Amino acid sequence: MSKLYEQILENNRNWVKSKLDQDPDFFNKLSQGQKPPLLWIGCADSRVPANEITGTQAGEVFVHRNIANMVIHTDMNMLSVLDYAVNALQVRHIIVCGHYGCGGVQAAMSNKSIGLIDNWVRHIKDVYRFHQEELDAIQEEKQRFDRFVEVNVIEQVYDLAKTSIVQNAWNEKRDLWVHGWVYGIHNGLIKDLDVTCKDNSDLEEVYKIKF
């Protein structure tokens, strides 16, 4: 076994000890079930750990992560997580959190083939197409990249609002909010993009589902 592998197991044992030192009943209480108020849809990037950057504890955040924090309506993994979070756990807030310097978003800005992931990146390219006029007008490449990260998050917020899962919760008068954030790896701070959906009123008529 590698030293890294053994160290990870040792880290786990140390973590258990620290939790039990703080609260001998910590794991007994945690094993009784979960009722997190928040669903986090974030990027799979290893530098963006949801609990750590939000200062939340085990049991407080239900998490789904993929390349570039995408909400794709044919992604059964994402939809299953969303359905369970909204209907079983009854979360009150869903946060889509992107991050500056996202490799998936950067890949969507080029025409270079990476491999299988090209098919996933294609969805991010669609976001660029929707916002091409704004993005192409930004001359400085890093600023354009950062803005692309932001508009990608915004589009995913609205894509969540378009799902039957979220709209059905609103139809049932549930208190459910969808937000868009971007995390700065360079400074550790979260930027609230001030895009929030609490009902489907901001959607074009064609996307509003009648139950």
Image (cartoon, rainbow, N blue to C red):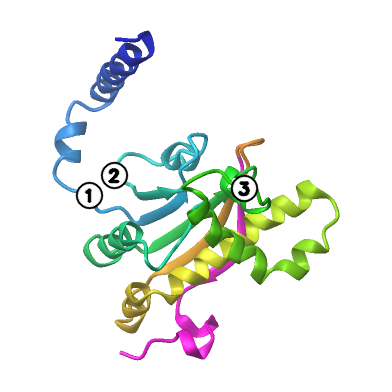
Q: Quadrant of the C terminus?
A: bottom left
Residue 25 locus on image (x, y percent)? 17, 31
The image shows residue 13 at horizontal and vertical percentages of 26, 17
Of the residues under marks 3 and 2, which one precedes in the sequence?
Answer: 2
Structural distance between the alpha carbons of marks 3 and 2: 34 Å
| Marks 1 and 2, the one that precedes in the sequence | 1
Q: Which residues are magenta?
A: 189-211
Query: Considering the image in quadrants, where does the N terminus appear?
Result: top left
Q: Which residue is mark 1?
A: 34
Residue 194 visible in the picture? no
What residue is disc 3 on? 107
Residue at disc 3, secondary structure? helix
Q: Is residue 7 magenta?
A: no
Q: Secondary structure at mark 2?
A: loop
Gap between marks 1 and 3, in whole Å? 37 Å
Instruction: Note whether 93 is above or below 118 in the view shown.
Output: below
- Judging from the image, what secondary structure is the residue with disc 1 in? loop
Residue located 46% across and 81% down the image: 200
Q: Amino acid at mark 1?
A: Gln
Residue 77 lies in quadrant: bottom left
Q: Are marks 1 and 2 in contact (CB under 8 Å)?
A: yes
Q: Which numbered mark, 3 or 2, is in the foreground of this view?
A: 3
